[in-house]
Image (cartoon, helix red, strand yellow):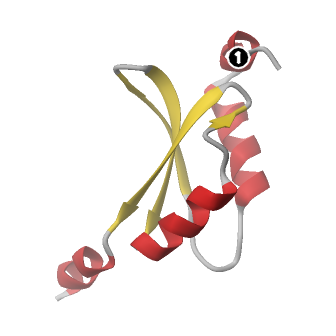
Amino acid sequence: MNANWAKSQSDEKILKQIAEQFKNDKYEIDFYIKSDDGGKHIEAKVVGQHFASELRKKIPINYCGWRTIVAFTPLDVILKKKD
């Protein structure tokens, strides 16, 4: 698939597609379209480093012509915030 064709598709469509393909019952994944020096990319965000490591093994570096990044919020940050 041509990367330029994929990026000409709507952000909402690609987010819905990737969310459906990688959803699971173990942890929640939030997908975003973001931009950095390299251009637009898909960011998958989870809570906990362990879940991020698992997700990195499943999501390809490029998904339908989009770069993908897996980021996580450390679990201890969430626990401290609730105090």
Which residue was labeled with disc 1?
3
- The residue lying at 25 percent from left, 80 percent from top is 76
Q: Is residue 39 left or right of residue 37?
A: right
Query: Quadrant of the image for the C terminus?
Result: bottom left
Above or below 52: residue 14: above
Extreme-bottom residue of the structure: 83
Q: Quadrant of residue 67?
A: top right
* Quadrant of the drawing holding the N terminus: top right
For the image, the number of numbered tags is: 1
Q: Position of residue 44 (x, y in %)?
A: 52, 51
Q: Is residue 62 left or right of residue 5?
A: left
Residue 61, horizontal then vertical, whole percent: 61, 40
Q: Vertically, is 35 above or below 80? A: above
Q: Position of residue 18 (x, y in %)?
A: 71, 46
Whether residue 34 is situated above or below residue 69 in the rendered picture:
above
At x 34%, y 20%, the residue is 37
The quadrant where residue 54 appears: bottom right
Observer-nearest of 11 and 49: 49
**Residue 56 % position (x, y):** 57, 57
What residue appears at the point 71 percent right and 70 percent down from the top-left corner? Answer: 24
Q: Secondary structure at mark 1?
A: helix
Q: Is 23 displayed left or right of 51 in the figure?
A: right
Direction right: furthest residue: 1
